[in-house]
Amino acid sequence: MNTPTFDLVEIIKVIQRNAKLILGITFVTALIGAVAYKVKDKEYKAKGEVYMLNPLYGDRNHILRRSNGDMRFVDYFGTEGDVDKAMTMIESKDVEDSVITQCGLYGAYKMDYGNPKDRAAMSERYRNMFEAKRTENASIMCSFVDTDPKRSAQVLDAIVNVTDYKFRSYLAKVKNSATGKINTKIKELDQQINIFTDSLIALRNQYQIYDIISPTRQNLMVTAISGAGKVNPAEGVEKIQNLESLKDQLVISRAELSATSNELTTNGVDEVKILHYVSTPFTPNKPSGLGFILTTLACAFAAFFFSVLLFSFTSYIKALANTER
């Protein structure tokens, strides 16, 4: 028994035998595709690209550094790790909920916030319409698709702004927390300094020694202190020197903490933005996806291909059945 062959010649013969039906299916499918394109709501994609500022641009080791030996240049752009954090935040549920509320998407899409199913549907729709990708230049390319071209650009801009605000809020919260603890420590140092000051005043009046004799100040000539008319000057020098050294260390520590506190408050949540646009999202002029002509041609080609495949398969099955008989 010979198995029937099926080559290009046979396929052409199948097309010739069923030409009218194949052309009819192709035409009808193309017509359906064209009508569906006209009837279906168009989707518009707004695009934007942002780069990230280094969140530590105001750190004491950078812009406000005081060390003469630290000659590092400031990297004003965020690192790879910073961009990873920005990607995590821009795709977070927190940003999603804020943007949906801010842009009034429940009303725009005719959904009810009080309905759990609508909330789930809104979240799924938002995540299907929004996309964020990292580029090789450590920037973030993001887009949002909507049936309203103006709204697509507005929502994308809101996503970037909300992400930036939440990022700055987090940094400000961390810095404010550190600043609060530093200021508490400064108050404790002030109390200790006042205690040492009162003690030094009492000792100087007791021993009648009013010279600066702290070793940390490196400006003392001990022989300059005369013992004439003083009560036990050796004891007084030692006691005053010990207390004055401790007080000087406390004053130095207080000055460093005060400088750090000022540096941490140089930028707040409402000042310098972290995310900046490379390309600002604009209202798209044309719908995304295939146009009218390409949609019609794609439907026609798909209908022609599958109809030829169907008739070829049917013809082969019939030939195989006749051979077996």
Image: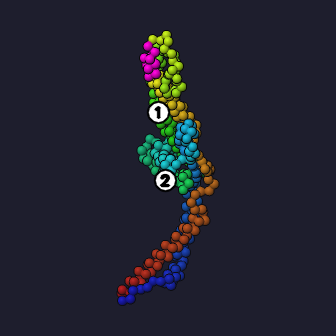
**Which region of the structure is painted magenta?**
232-242
Q: Using the image, determine if residue 182 lies above or below residue 82.
A: above
Looking at the rendered structure, which numbered label has been put on residue 204?
none
The image shows residue 195 at horizontal and vertical percentages of: 45, 18
Q: Nearer the viewer, residue 260 or 142?
A: 260
Provide the residue designation for mark 2: 128
Mark 1 or mark 2, whichever is nearer to me:
1
The answer to the question of whether label 1 and label 2 lie on touching residues, with beta carbons closer than 8 A, is no
Question: From what the image shows, is residue 14 above or below residue 102?
Answer: below
List x then y, in percent, for residue 213.
50, 22
Pinpoint residue 50: horizontal percent, then vertical percent: 57, 49
Whether residue 224 appears in magenta in the rendering, the answer is no
Counting the numbered discs, the total is 2
Q: Amino acid at mark 2?
A: Asn
Q: Which mark is residue 177?
A: 1
Residue 39 seen in the figure: no
Residue occupying image coordinates x 49% and y 27%: 216
Q: Please state which of residues 72 and 137 is positioned toward the viewer in this rendering.
A: 72
